[in-house]
Image (cartoon, grey):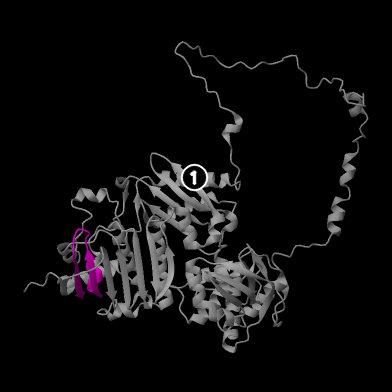
């Protein structure tokens, strides 16, 4: 039998590697901008067209590359960041695998222009699908200029699965945010379809956060700083009163590298216990400095997941540091030890005699012996006071009428097991419903006991109402007496622009003021009890959370976001009439069994299953 194992061509191997490293246009920008940072650039410009599908250009003023280095940079596992295996334990640069440029060149058309400061001429290399088409000397500025055109042009299946331009640009901006927040000392700019989206000058960390998230962030930030032998922590944490119902302002950085860490996120949230509602997200920008040997950044191709040696200890340090920062703003009680003086802890000498502490005891003290009590204006002694108290004899008469009274009072509590109604009766009565744990509605049916999730049921009811309103354009808007201005972060503003038209069709009246600010003039008529700003933030957050999990048209997903934000929550106590109304409306829906996201709304526990519980 002939041999069947063979080495893959470099072009195919690069495309396979690209599947791990390059998922979408945002991945290209991440790799190219991080390379520019590693090259010592102080100014980086990013330009994209069609959300990066047609063109991505990253220009920097870094050290540039020689003619040989420019050619080698597109080879697999070619890197200037490490030379020996030991270097993997001392990594402080962004990239080190040597796969990024080779992967990009395998699924796009790439043009590189680069020059070192000591060279009069630079180098231009043109590649297409990993194949070098041209290399020639040119005149260009110091640094590097990468042009990546027609991403995934030779992998149509990958290109087909790219999302809309607004969604892809949102991912680009997310990656851009993570890099610029890690390097406030570098100037950045981002241009999309010939419109400059943001320009960030060189500045300090606080001003960089304000430039990215808006001026309203200035009053929200509280400094956090803590240094230990394990880790040094610095940065800012948001004040509780400015917490949003949308995520997007939570960032961890380790040695100037962005990372995701759900465990450390819980450490921050723990510090906000009993301060924030469960559905609010505290803002934080926390920077860690640790010995590179105590972490492993090589566990994921995108290098955003990092393993720590002392995670449990760092968890406690984070919680303590955040609590200390909140204490300084008088949000949490904090002890200022300086106000209590210095605690004197005596030191024992070698010749110090240690003895059992002695407690003085007055053995002649009699607690039952009364003494005259000197009261101002009242010379009566305590004996007289007790002697003059009303007699407590015949105290049992106080309880003679208790039983009679309790029987006479009406029973206001509903019976736990209401009697079954006549089998011929078609309509349910309010006694047929029982609420359990503020979450489920229980009602008897012929086959047993029906259990209904009250929140999912309400979401289904509201969703079908909103879909009908969108189809018939009959949404009712409730005008606000005082329009409410809302400042959104860049990601939420991008989502809002995507949803703006459909939000207005659902009954919103929102004016775009520019600079990430909107003015809410009217909201849909709904049961939502929060402010208009909270309603808009919840809709945006629900849309972000379901973007990759819920299928349907854009209008349906917007309707689902509004329904989820407006539906009753768990723990809401309902009256018997409210439960009956909710159940009636649920079974009037086209699909009462499942929520719009595909989760079960109700279940039936049949009589046989109940009987088995008692056998």
Q: In which quadrant of the rendered view does residue 161 lie?
A: bottom left
**Residue most toward the bottom?**
472
Q: Using the image as rendered, state which of residue 353 and residue 607 is in the foreground.
A: 353
Query: From what the image shows, is residue 339 above or below residue 235?
Result: above
Mark 1 Cα within 10 Å, few/some/many (few <14, many 20+)? many
**Where are the magenta residues, as a range?**
102-128
| Relative to 413, 17 lies left or right | left
Circle 1 — which element?
A: helix
x, y percent for residue 423: 69, 80
Lateral position of residue 395 relative to residue 512, left or right: right
Residue 373 part of the magenta-drawn span? no
The residue indicated by pointer 1 is 321
Q: Nearer the viewer, residue 418 or 441?
A: 441
Residue 585 point in image, percent of width and height: 64, 80
Residue depicted at 58% across the width and 54% down the height:
240
At 44% from the left edge and 47% from the top edge, which residue is drawn? Answer: 234
Can residue 46 be seen here? The reply is yes
View extreme (left): residue: 1
In the rendering, at what x and y percent does residue 400 appear? 88, 47
* Residue 276: % across, % down: 58, 55
For residue 280, side relative to residue 429 (left or right): left
Is residue 277 visible to us here?
no
Quadrant of image for the C terminus: bottom right
């Amino acid at each position: 039998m002939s041999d069947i194992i063979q080495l893959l061509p470099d072009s195919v191997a690069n495309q396979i590697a690209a599947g791990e490293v390059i998922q979408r246009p945002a991945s290209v920008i991440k790799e190219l901008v991080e390379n520019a940072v590693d090259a010592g650039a102080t100014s980086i410009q990013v330009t994209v067209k069609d959300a990066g599908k047609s063109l991505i250009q990253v220009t920097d003023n870094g050290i540039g590359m020689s003619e040989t280095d420019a050619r080698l940079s597109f080879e697999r596992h070619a890197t200037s960041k490490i030379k020996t295996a030991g270097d993997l334990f001392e990594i402080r640069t962004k990239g080190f695998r040597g796969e990024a440029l080779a992967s990009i060149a395998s699924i796009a058309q790439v043009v590189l222009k680069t020059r070192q400061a000591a060279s009069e001429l630079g180098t231009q290399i043109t590649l297409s699908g990993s194949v070098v088409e041209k290399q020639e000397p040119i005149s260009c500025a110091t640094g590097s200029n990468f042009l990546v055109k027609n991403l995934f042009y030779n992998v149509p299946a990958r290109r087909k699965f790219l999302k809309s331009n607004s969604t892809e640009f949102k991912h680009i901006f997310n990656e851009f945010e993570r890099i610029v927040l890690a390097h406030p000392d570098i100037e950045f700019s981002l241009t999309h379809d010939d419109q400059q989206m943001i320009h960030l000058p060189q500045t300090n960390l606080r001003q960089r956060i304000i430039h990215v998230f808006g001026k309203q962030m200035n009053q929200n930030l509280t400094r956090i700083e803590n240094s230990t032998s394990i880790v040094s922590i610095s940065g800012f944490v948001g004040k509780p009163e400015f917490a949003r119902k949308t995520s997007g302002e939570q960032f961890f950085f380790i040695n100037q590298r962005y990372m995701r860490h759900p465990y450390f996120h819980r450490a921050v949230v723990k510090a906000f216990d009993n301060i924030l509602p469960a559905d609010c997200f505290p803002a934080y920008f926390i920077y860690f400095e640790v010995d590179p040997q105590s972490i492993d950044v090589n566990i994921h191709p995108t290098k955003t997941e990092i393993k720590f040696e002392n995670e449990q200890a760092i968890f406690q340090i984070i919680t303590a540091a955040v609590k200390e920062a909140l204490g300084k703003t008088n949000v949490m009680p904090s002890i200022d030890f300086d106000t209590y003086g210095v605690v004197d802890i005596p030191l024992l000498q070698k010749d110090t005699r240690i003895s059992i502490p002695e407690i003085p005891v007055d053995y002649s003290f009699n607690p039952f012996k009364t003494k005259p009590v000197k009261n101002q204006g009242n010379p009566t002694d305590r004996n007289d006071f007790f002697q003059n108290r009303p007699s407590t004899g015949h105290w049992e008469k106080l309880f003679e009428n208790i039983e009679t009274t309790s029987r006479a009072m009406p029973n206001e509590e509903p019976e736990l097991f209401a009697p079954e109604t006549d089998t011929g009766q078609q309509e349910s009565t309010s006694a047929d419903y029982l609420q359990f744990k503020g979450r489920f509605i229980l009602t008897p049916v012929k086959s047993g006991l029906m259990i209904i999730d009250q929140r999912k049921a309400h979401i289904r009811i509201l969703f079908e109402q909103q879909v009908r309103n969108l189809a018939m354009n009959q949404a009712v808007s409730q005008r606000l007496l005082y329009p409410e201005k809302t400042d959104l972060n860049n990601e939420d503003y991008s989502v809002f622009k995507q949803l703006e038209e459909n939000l207005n069709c659902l009954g919103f009246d929102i004016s775009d003021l520019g600079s990430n600010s909107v003015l809410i003039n009217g909201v849909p008529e709904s049961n939502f009890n929060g402010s208009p700003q909270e309603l808009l933030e919840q809709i945006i957050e629900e849309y972000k959370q379901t973007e990759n999990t819920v299928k349907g048209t854009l209008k349906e997903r917007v309707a689902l976001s509004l329904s989820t934000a407006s539906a009753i929550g768990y723990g809401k106590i309902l009256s018997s009439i409210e439960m009956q109304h909710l159940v009636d409306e649920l079974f009037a829906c086209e699909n009462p069994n499942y929520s719009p996201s595909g989760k079960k709304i109700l279940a039936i526990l049949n009589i046989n299953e109940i009987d088995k519980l008692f056998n």
